[in-house]
Image (tube, rainbow, N blue to C red):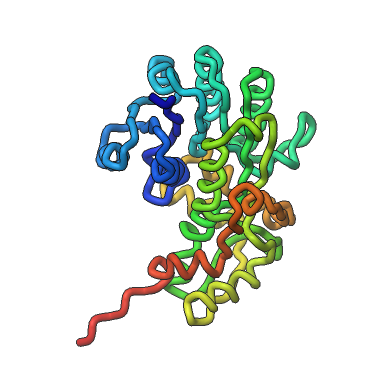
Amino acid sequence: MTNPILVTGAAGRVGGIGRTITELLLKQGKAVRAMVRNEDERARALRDMGAQVVVGDLLDLDTMHRAIAGCETMYFGMSVSDTYLAATVNAAAVAKHHGVKAFINMSQMTLSQMSITETTASPQHKLHWLAEQALNWSGLPVVHVRPTVLLEGFFLIFTSDSVRESNQIRLPFGEGKTSPVAVEDVARVLAALLANPQPHIGKIYHLTGPQSENMHFYAQEYSKALGRTITFQDIPVEPWRDGLLERGLPVHLVNHLATMADLHRAGRYDRMSNDVATLTGHGPLSVQEFVRKNAAAFTALAKEAA
């Protein structure tokens, strides 16, 4: 029997990276072991797709042995968390013990501008940077994948309400340019690496969308996709940050998001890479295409006739 490919974080919402990787690999006929946090309907859906499901915590040693044993190739990805570094090292230690031959690590693109003397105000960025260092020191056969800001992140979660209600994109990005990338494109890259990892060991890939432009440009792309005029309204970072805290988001996550906003304002997200097309043979989704695909999220429900 073929050794399964381990995918952590596989129970993410529909359209989540781990879940999408699992779907893509299963469609290719690969054996997949999907690691999930809880036994729920999402875990059952993965089993129904044909994945072998392991339930547990990335910080739990026994879970990681059950998840990794028998896998030669694995994907490590974890959402923003103050335990990110501990989870990475735990997974790496167990992976090394079991002789994993390819450890595909989900990182982020800001690390390309960080070093032992340069960091950011985001504690998550620092944890990601340290995690990459630890993986490199481990001697594991690692591939680092560094996407820029995700379309499903800022652009879907944080603009849909204002676009739906007032035809405005309200984000604290200033005049900075950005090149957001879709989850499906990140997942296509990761699935390609997991299916044939050996040529890529030791490499770092940077993933962006097809263009880097400011938010006024993207407002025009929203307008074309939705068939109505959408404008960009810059907002200050601090009140936006306060609003996220009022919504109950964890402080660690809010500090990370606020730093991303500050870096956008400073032009630090003006980045471009052809790695998506090079690794998959197909270029990444544009903002206009993404908004068109998700038009329902940006469109108010028509009022019922009286």
**How far from the left and from the top, in percent, is residue 81?**
50, 34
Report which quarter residue 92 is drawn in.
Answer: top right
Report which quarter residue 23 is drawn in.
Answer: top left
Q: In the rendered image of this protein, does residue 202 appear above or below residue 218?
A: above
Residue farthest along the top direction in this orientation: 97
**How far from the left and from the top, in percent, is residue 143?**
63, 33
Q: Residue at x 46, y 57 (%)?
A: 157
If the image is split into quadrants, where does the N terminus sit? top left
Q: How many marks?
A: 0
Q: Residue at x 43, y 19 (%)?
A: 70
Residue farthest along the right direction in this orientation: 117
Residue farthest along the front direction in this orientation: 1
Q: In the rendered image of this protein, does residue 130 appear above or below residue 44?
A: above
Residue farthest along the bottom direction in this orientation: 306
**How far from the left and from the top, in percent, is residue 159?**
50, 63
Q: In the rendered image of this protein, does residue 44 appear above or below residue 171?
A: above
- Front residue of this view, candidates 238 and 42: 42
**How far from the left and from the top, in percent, is residue 93?**
54, 16
Report whether residue 249 is seen. Answer: no
Report which quarter residue 305 is drawn in.
Answer: bottom left
Q: In the rendered image of this protein, does residue 21 appear above or below residue 163?
A: above
Q: Residue at x 20, y 87 (%)?
A: 306
Report whether residue 241 is seen. Answer: yes
